[in-house]
Amino acid sequence: QPNIYHKEQGMGRLAGKKALVTGAGQGIGEAIALAFGKEGASVFVSDLNGEKAAEVAQRIVSEGGDAQPVVLDVTSEAAWNEFSATFEGALNILVHNAGIEWVVPIEDIELSDWRRVMAVNVEGVFLGCQKMLDALKQGGADNEAGASVVVISSIAGQIGYPDQAAYNTSKAAVKHLSRTMAIEFAAKGYNIRVNSIHPGAIDTPMLREAMEGWAEHKIFGTTDMDVVRREVAALHPINKIGRPRDIAYGVVYLASDESRFVTGTELTIDGGWTAR
Ligand code: NAD
């Protein structure tokens, strides 16, 4: 199969920028960090899982980029305080990618699980933006195109979907938080753009786990994983499941100066799922 991502070398679209990506140890966050490295950013590869963050950072460095791993639990105010206290200079790009999925029907959701989903998917975004705001302001002051915050939401934040009420609610909440921050930062003249990205189904460990949940709850009328995978692909008019890089290139655009006039918007990357 031809490699449509023919650019083994990037084009310097993020040259000179300092970026922090959360949940970058695997899946979509890993692809974002790798794409950032190729495009010339200095990447802080952060994750709850330090080993995975170190592996991704190492790969960026071995491909000629600049990266360092960071162990960061996005739900921990203390961890954000510690990271921001030691962070030096301007932050140009902050990608809120860390997230957890929860496939449980409403009647069975435990309050503690509901709160955990909100803590990672919503509070993590709020905390990260608040604690890194001074560094982002400096990033905005350094550059006419502004600093860029990108929030990885989901199409689950735009449309309803059964058996994942906590997840869907969290993803709608961060969409609105993104818009609100975009307006508030613009009104205050901070020169920080904020946008959300809404992926369809992307082939990552999270999706594979979610599909197991959909099979278990017979969302597609069957427990057969091959059928579930085909059904999930068919939810997208272009009849395929996305790859992490499909999202990463959207993030590169929103993080780069090419998107200097883009703030407070939703970029949907979903193979047409929500278009019909
Ligand atoms: P994944 O589960 O494969 O990877 C998530 C990463 O986040 C892991 O490395 C994990 O260690 C890390 N993480 C989890 N909790 C954390 C915490 N408290 N602090 C720091 N890191 C933490 O997930 P993915 O599929 O790559 O998803 C990434 C983002 O994209 C999530 O926000 C998810 O909701 C969103 N998304 C995914 C899909 C999809 O189909 N995969 C679709 C729409 C949106």
Image: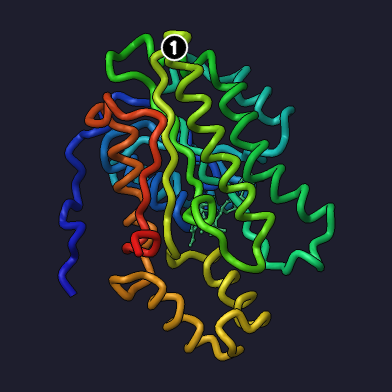
Query: Is 135 on the left-hand or right-hand side of 145?
Result: right
> Residue 173 falls in which quadrant of the image?
top right
Decide: is 72 above or below 227: above
Q: Position of residue 151 (x, y in %)?
A: 48, 39
- Tell which of 57 and 114 is nearer to you: 114
- Residue 17, given in percent of the width and then of the height, sits at 34, 25
Q: How many marks?
A: 1
Of 16 and 256, nearer the camera is: 256
Residue shown at the point (42%, 15%) measured from the top left: 186
Which of the 4 quarters of the picture holds residue 6?
bottom left
Left or right relative to 215: residue 32:
left
For disc 1, the marked residue is: 190
Residue for point 40% across, 41% down: 266
Quadrant occupied by the N terminus? bottom left
- In the rendered view, does 16 fall on the left or right side of 74? left
Instruction: Look at label 1 and name its amino acid.
Output: Tyr
Q: Taking 245 as reference, is 37 above or below it?
A: above
